[in-house]
Amino acid sequence: MEEIILESDCVFAGSLTPSVDHQYFVAEDSSQNVCLWKWTTTGVEKVREYGISGITAPSISADGKYIAYDPMGDPGDFVFEDLISGQEVNRINYPFRVDWESGLSPDGSFFFLSMQENGGEDLYLMVFDLQNNRFVHKFGPYGNTIPSYLRIEYLPASIRDLWSWSSY
């Protein structure tokens, strides 16, 4: 876990989801609007508002190009936007309720989503191939917690063989 020191006159509520390069983050403002923020040399600036509890499970790609999130008003979909323009670049449909977190692989080719299956209590980690827009694997069930990390060898061979691991 890394500590991030944020100095700003703005008031933030809820959790803070930073980009890997720490140039952007997702957090609620003082009115509980979920927002995308950018650090500047003088503080922070609001890039975009998603509304009160407008999105869940946000993640920002490692290269800082995309933001992925579950739009609260559109159950069953996960949206991928260009971080700067806000233009939707992809959308995947999933059959389960999102409960916890999402994440993009460092190269942006795979998407990971933790969720409960059909309202059950067990958690699963779902893997989606974004280049081919398809679901590829489900890890679990995990009871009420997902392991803090999954080792590379836990991934199915079909994912391990497609991914270039030399830079990780």
Image (cartoon, helix red, strand yellow):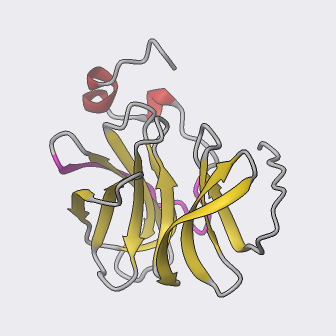
Q: How many marks?
A: 0
Percent x, y for residue 79? 31, 63
Residue 17 appears left or right of 3: left
Residue nearest the viewer, comparing 165 with 39:
39
Tell me if I can see residue 136 in this picture.
yes
Q: Which residue: 81% across, 62% down?
A: 8
Q: Is residue 64 left or right of residue 80?
A: right
What quarter of the picture does the N terminus occupy?
top right
Furthest residue to the left? 132
**Residue 10's quadrant in the figure?**
bottom right
Q: Residue 66: x and y, percent?
A: 39, 48
Q: Is residue 162 magenta?
A: no
Q: In the picture, residue 155 is in which quadrant?
A: top left
Question: What residue is shown at x 18% (from left), y 50% (from top)?
Answer: 134
Q: Nearer the viewer, residue 138 or 27?
A: 27
Q: Residue at x 42, y 54 (%)?
A: 67
Q: Nearer the viewer, residue 84 or 134?
A: 84
Residue 125 visible to an observer of this rendering: no
Q: Residue at x 45, y 56 (%)?
A: 140
Drawn side of residue 22 relative to residue 3, left or right: left
The residue at the far top in this view is 166
Q: Position of residue 78 (x, y in %)?
A: 32, 65
Percent of width and height locating residue 163: 33, 24
State which region is magenta: 133-146
Which of these two is toward me, 81 or 129?
Answer: 81
Q: Is residue 153 above or below residue 81?
A: above
